[in-house]
Image (tube, rainbow, N blue to C red):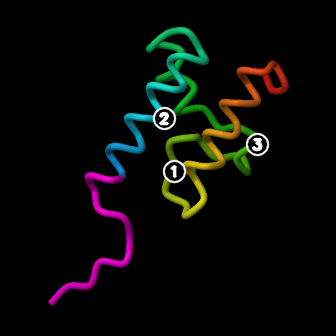
């Protein structure tokens, strides 16, 4: 029997889709969102938002960063 201690893959996909949608709203286009998701950011310990989502607190941190970008607090 295999033990699964992490989130289910469908949960991860739903979270990525939600973050992609939020980022598209904040950043204004799918192209900018795709680039942003693959660009390292100092606010995420120098990791890309996509890579940071693998952390336990990753989705909350990425959403917080998007909120700061939306408010103009982060470039």
SS at mark 1 in the image: loop
Relative image position of residue 55 (x, y in whole percent): 55, 60
Name the residue at 53% across, 33% down: 38
Residue 4 lies within the magenta run: yes
The boundaries of the magenta stretch are 1-11
For marks 3 and 1 on the same chain, the one whose residue lies earlier in the sequence: 3
Cα separation between marks 1 and 2: 10 Å
Residue named by callout 2: 19
Relative image position of residue 24 (x, y in whole percent): 50, 18
Residue most extreme to the top: 28
Is the C-beta separation of discs 3 and 1 under 8 Å? no
Magenta stretch secondary structure, dominant: loop
SS at mark 2 in the image: helix
Relative image position of residue 71 (x, y in whole percent): 78, 21
Relative image position of residue 65 (x, y in whole percent): 70, 36
Residue 44 lies within the magenta run: no
Residue 75 or 8: which is nearer the viewer?
Answer: 8
Cα separation between marks 3 and 1: 13 Å
Left or right, 31 with respect to 3, comes to right
Q: Is 63 placed above or below 69 here? A: below
Cα separation between marks 3 and 2: 16 Å
Image mark for residue 43: 3
Name the residue at 45% across, 29% down: 20
Residue most extreme to the right: 73
Residue most extreme to the bottom: 1
For marks 3 and 2 on the same chain, the one whose residue lies earlier in the sequence: 2
The image quadrant where one finds the C terminus is top right
Is the C-beta separation of discs 1 and 2 under 8 Å? yes
Residue named by callout 1: 53
């Amino acid at each position: 029997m295999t033990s699964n201690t992490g989130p289910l893959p469908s949960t991860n996909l739903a979270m990525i889709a939600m973050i992609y949608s939020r980022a598209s709203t904040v950043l204004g286009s799918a192209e900018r969102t795709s680039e942003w998701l693959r660009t390292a950011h100092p606010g995420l310990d120098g990791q890309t938002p996509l890579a940071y989502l693998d952390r336990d607190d990753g989705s909350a941190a990425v959403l917080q960063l998007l909120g700061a970008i939306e408010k103009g607090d982060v470039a």
